[in-house]
Each structure stands twice: as structure tokens, then as C-alpha cells.
Amino acid sequence: PLSTSSAKPKTLDVLGTAYATDAWTNTPPAILAKTGRDLLHQPSHPLAILKELIFKEFPTFAHYDSLSPVVSTYQNFDSLGFAQDHPGRSKTDTYYVNQTTLLRTHTSAHQLQLLAAGSQGDVGVLVQAKNSTAAPANERFLVAADVYRRDEIDASHYPVFHQMEGVCTFLRKEVRDRLHIGNNMTKEDAVARGVCHSDQVAQLVDATAVGDDNPMQPVHSAEEVAFVVNDMKQAMNNMVVQILTKAVAAQQHSGEPSVAGGQMLFPVRWIDAYFPFTSPSWEMEVFFQGEWLEICGCGVMKQEILDQAGMPDRIGWAFGFGLERLAMLLFGVHDIRLFWSSDSRFTEQFSPGSINSFKPFSRHPSCAKDVSFWLAADSAFHENDIMDLVRETAGDLVEGVKLIDSFTHPKTGKSSRCYRINYCSMDRNVTNEEINSVQELVRKRIVEQLGVTLR
Ligand code: DAH
């Protein structure tokens, strides 16, 4: 619906390349502008600091952090086994450049491409690793990158965020040999590695088991799956423990309880999950300020991906970490918009290699404005359309958009919606007049672009 009223240009320029537009094109200018921000390459940015900390935990992996956000629909979805009708593919959830090209919605979009580059010795891709000798055939790699999703607006959701993908593969023959010798898989080992129960800062709990609800793939043996899963959980537990330890140490050092909200012990749990490209699958969650925060998804890679990449003789695990969630917790950043601020009062508070607590600058008052409208009877209205529209109009002045009322008129059958838009600058004072004129523009555009009637 966003595209119906304004004529669409023939091409869309993304990072210097012109792409033909079509009926799928739905990426607005404010989102395109983010593709060049490159937060992960600003050494003092909290997200870049976290990226480096994770890279350090995986010295034997190839490290990628400069892959273009423009990928094919095939890379982002098909190559990973997403069903044709998977909701993630819809225009309401994903920013398309055109039907066959989009802004990656996750770093998993690079799995097949990087594995295939390794098995084919594609030097053009392999040299893009920052440490190309660590895993010269991409048998293990990490990808840190910006990812894009149409989504709601609140303090922890932003249409652009960052992920870290991890992939680790093993020759199946080597796994079998090691299992046969038995030096890697004593029961104590397995417990110590995968199901570690306590640590100084993290309290790891894993009550999951591979079985009917979270099945292994028929092509794998139970033993090799156990080996791969233990290796994965050990690697991820270690990473999280290292990072939390660093945060708590920083807190003790500074004598200020504000890092990580003063919390000293972090419950971390593993729960069963589902992804199209792994089986079995898990999510890892951290308990923080009364809530379980999902910080990553992971699992045993679908064998089809490795087969497709020309590596049928390998088995592997993969994870995808959300960097913002963890960075907000570690650096005490309570509003996700701050990561995009170029205000020096934000950017100058951090330095490479260290975790320290963000000291908020004065909190500016927020101001709520409601907008109510009738939908047309046959309306294809989707909530993410209004999210994009408000974001495009108000930029980072908008702190949240929330549906506060919705009903259908019993006689006319028409539906009404009321959204509350919260305006609040994260870094400057804003006048009432400014907010009023932004709200006026929002109301005007809602009518023009969404084809609704204001109430
Ligand atoms: N790509 C998933 C997401 O964005 C996260 C993920 C889950 C990545 C499981 C993985 C994985 O590599 O194995 O939600």
C-alpha cells in the first residue's frame, strides 16, 4: 500500500549500484540511508566493540564484517530452505529492492555462499576475510553485519540491527574417528562442555534433549550429532561467559553498579527452537532485569546446505547472535536509537576493547499523539506500513508506535484503528511546534499513502 500513490522511480540506488524497481520494491529512503552508516567499523562504537570481543573468542574462524547488505532472495530464503509461503518472505516483513534482490534480513543469508566459496577456492570471496589464514577454506567462519526488517517501533526494535553469524564444520570422517577413539566424548566431558551448570557470572541451565520434538536429521548418527551439539554449546557458553565476565569486571573496577544494571550473576538458559535451516535447533536466553532476553538461535546445519555447497563429507553447527540485545545490556543503553546517534555525548563514552556503562544525558520529555482512522472495507493494511511511514516522516524523533484501540463497526463492517505515537528526542530539545508539524505530516501521509479515512 505504501507505494500506490507516489510514482515509483525506475531504479533504486543502493550503495552505488542502480537496481531496477518492480512491484516488490518497498525500501524507503531513510532505510537506504542506513546501508552506508557502517557502525561496525567505528572502533569506539559499542556494537563494534562487542563484535571484536566475539571475534576474539573464535581465533580459528575466518572473520567477515564487510559483506554487502544487498543479497538475492535466493540467498536470504531459498538457499536456507524457507518454504515459499514463509511469512518472512512477505513484503510486509522484508525490505525488497526488487523481486529477486533484498536487504538481508539475517546474516544466515551468507552461509551457503561462504561455504561454497571455501569448497571451490573462490579467492575473490576468501580474501574478504580479515584473517584469511585462520580457516583458509571457510570451514569455520563468523559474519558480523547489519540486517534489515520491517517491524514495530519501540525501545528495543529498530528496522536495522546487527547480527553475528557463526558456522563451524567438521569432516564427518574425523568426527567418527574421534568418537571411535573415545577421547572426546566421556560422559563427564559431555556434561562439562554442553551442560555446564554454574560459573562465576553465568548460571547455565540446559534441560533440553534431542528427540521427537527437536529431531536430529536422519542422515546423521546420534553420536556425531552429540559431538557437534556439545562442541557448539561449549563454544557458545564460553563466549557468553567471557563477555559477561568482562562486563562484571568492568563494573567492579569502576565501582559503579550501572554496567549491566548492577547485576552480577546472569542466568543463561537453552531452550528448544525451530529454524528452517537447522535441526535440532535451540535458542539461548539471558535473564536480565526480570525478563528472559533471547540472544541467539543455533543448531545443527541442515545437511542439504552443506551438500549444496559441495561439502557432503562435512557436518556443522551454526548460530546467529543479535548484537543489539547484548550490547544494550552490557553497555547500559536503554534506547536502541542511541546506537545510531552521532551526538558526541554518546559516541565519546566508549573506547575499543572495553565495556563500560553509558551515562545517559538529560532525558527529554516525551509527547504522545494519537491518530485514528477507518480502513477501507477491502483494505490490505498492514501494521508495518504505518511503522515505516512514521519512521520516514519523523526519523529518530519517534520512540514508539502502539496500537491502542481497534474495533469493527457492527453495522457498516468498517474497521477502525487508533495508534499512539510517542515522540521523544534521544539527544536534543524539541519544541511543541516541531512535533505538531511532524504529526500533521504523518496524518496527511497516512491518508495519501495508506488509503484510509481519518476519524
Ligand atoms: N537467522 C536466524 C534469525 O535471524 C538466527 C539463526 C538461528 C542463525 C539459527 C543460525 C542458526 O545460524 O543456526 O532469526
Image: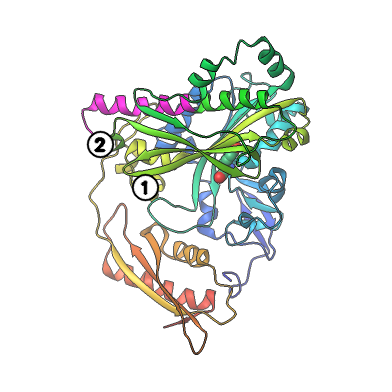
Q: At x 56% / y 42%, what residue is drawn?
A: 273
Report x, y in % for residue 54. Answer: 48, 28
Residue drawn at the location 58% of the way across and 19% of the way down: 60
Q: Which residue is mark 1?
A: 338
Boundaries of the magenta span: 237-257
Q: Is residue 3 above or below residue 378?
A: above
Q: Which residue is mark 2?
A: 258
Q: What type of secondary structure mainly makes up the magenta span?
A: helix
Residue 241 belongs to the span the image colors magenta: yes
Q: Is residue 144 visible?
A: no
Mark 1 Cα-neighbour bin, 10 Å: few <14, some 14–19, many ≥20: some
Name above or below for residue 24 compared with residue 164: below
Quarter holding the C terminus? Answer: bottom left
- Total label count? 2
- In the rendered view, tell whether residue 116 sits above or below residue 156: above
Residue 264: where, in percent of width, then height? 29, 30
Residue 147 visible here? yes
